[in-house]
Amino acid sequence: MKAISVLGSTGSIGTQTLEIVEEFPDQFRVVALTAGRNLTLLLEQIQKHQPEVVALADEELVNELRDRLNELPLERRPNKLPKILGGTDGLNEAASWDHADLVVTGIVGCAGLLPTLAAIRSGKDIALANKETLIAAGPVVLPELKRSGSRLLPADSEHSAIFQCLQGTPWAENARLSTGVPNPGLRSIHLTASGGAFRDWSTEDLKNATVTDATNHPNWSMGRKITVDSATLMNKGLEVIEAHYLFGLDYDQIEIVIHPQSIIHSMIELADSSVLAQLGWPDMKLPILYCMSWPSRLETPWKRLSLKEVGQLTFNSPDTEKYPCMQLAYSVGRVGGTMPAVLNAANEEAVAQFLEEKIHFLEIPKLIEATCENHKKDLKSQPNLEEVLFVDSWARNAVREKVDSGLNRVVFLGS
């Protein structure tokens, strides 16, 4: 039985991971949970899964969680109360918990970087659902993987598809999965994109886009932030950078293809021109389960794919005018160094400002681009962890200050 640590247990990835544990109780058990502020859901998870350790990002909530556990009736109380930790040190301890075999990194954004690094340094296998770990800190993470022998298994649907297609190649046969090392038999990667909430909108219509519009994805059920990223296509741009670090290909070898049905989750082209694809219904539980069960596959009762039901599979080139974030991500990836960390942080903050309705949807890419442009003079080509964390904080502050000053409306939208 595989022991699982879930980082971000109350979020979308975390809750789906725990659903899988419940469906396969003979295969998985939970030994560690971490969460933010949703104590009600976390309390239910503790009762159900009885982890050995629980960590809260907000240290001030630790005593409240302890009190709520102690107040439970005896029949609903866990057989043994977990160790309860708080703050960054607590998250890191839970991430590197000794009894865990696999750590599922479901914490959204750069907040997941330090716990993921803690898990890597302790030699844990990682089911990587937090793409920011590699995007913001690829130059830091890859050497840590090499030192510890930790194996990085992609839980994102597109990268999982690539990973599955690569099984049987020299890349996958390497004991450490050769993260960041080119596969001599791999010619190119084709990342499929649904097109997000605005795939059927014209560029002109985007002037009327609202938060409700942007968070209504036609295919996938995801968190609000990632759903907005899908609407801007920044999620795909970020996935290009992540694919570069995971699979060792140059940016010219990674292509984005609009695939509205979201049935093909990505494709690879091999040296002999063969193209392999992974297909399935749009359900994040599939790639999460594959990470959890790898290198085995488990039989599930889930709905089986019917191509007759799908009817057709279509593909288009993405509209670069409609999706400026995509091209921005390619440019930033080629620059490298600390620039991807700035891109990621500026995007997170810009999306947060949009979700709070402080800026318009069209201001998101313009704020990000301006922040990246301002960082050029301070770019670090081979950053260490402290430099990555510094530029992450700087970029967030830069976006907030621009929004708070109101200058973004003059500089970006005045024309």
Image: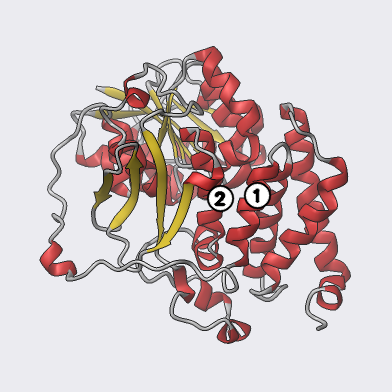
Residue situated in front as seen by the camera: 405 or 270? 270
- Write down the residue under mark 1: 344
Closer to the camera, 80 or 23? Answer: 23
User: 48 left or right of 200?
Assistant: left
Relative side of 199 to 332, left or right: left
| Residue 113 lies in quadrant | top right
Q: How is the image coloured?
A: secondary structure
Question: Which residue is pictured at 38% across the width and 62% down the height?
Answer: 221
Does residue 252 show up? yes
- Residue 91 visible, this orientation: no
Quadrant of residue 57 within the rendered picture: top right
Q: Is residue 138 left or right of residue 120?
A: right
Mark 2 highlights which residue? 238
Mark 1 vs mark 2, CA separation in Å: 8 Å
Identified by mark 1, the residue type is: Asn
Query: Does the residue at mark 1 contact the one at mark 2 (Cβ under 8 Å)?
Result: yes
* Residue type, mark 2 in image: Leu
Name the spot of residue 231 as percent of width and height, x first: 52, 68
Q: Viewer-proximal residue, 49 or 194?
A: 194
Name the secondary structure under disc 2: helix
- Classify 208 as above or below 11: below
Q: Residues within 10 Å of mark 1 (few under 14, many from 20)?
A: many
Quadrant housing the C terminus? bottom right
Looking at the rendered structure, the secondary structure element under dot 1 is helix
Vertical arrangement, residue 319 with respect to residue 244, above or below: below
Q: Which numbered disc, 1 or 2, marks the residue that appears first in the sequence?
A: 2
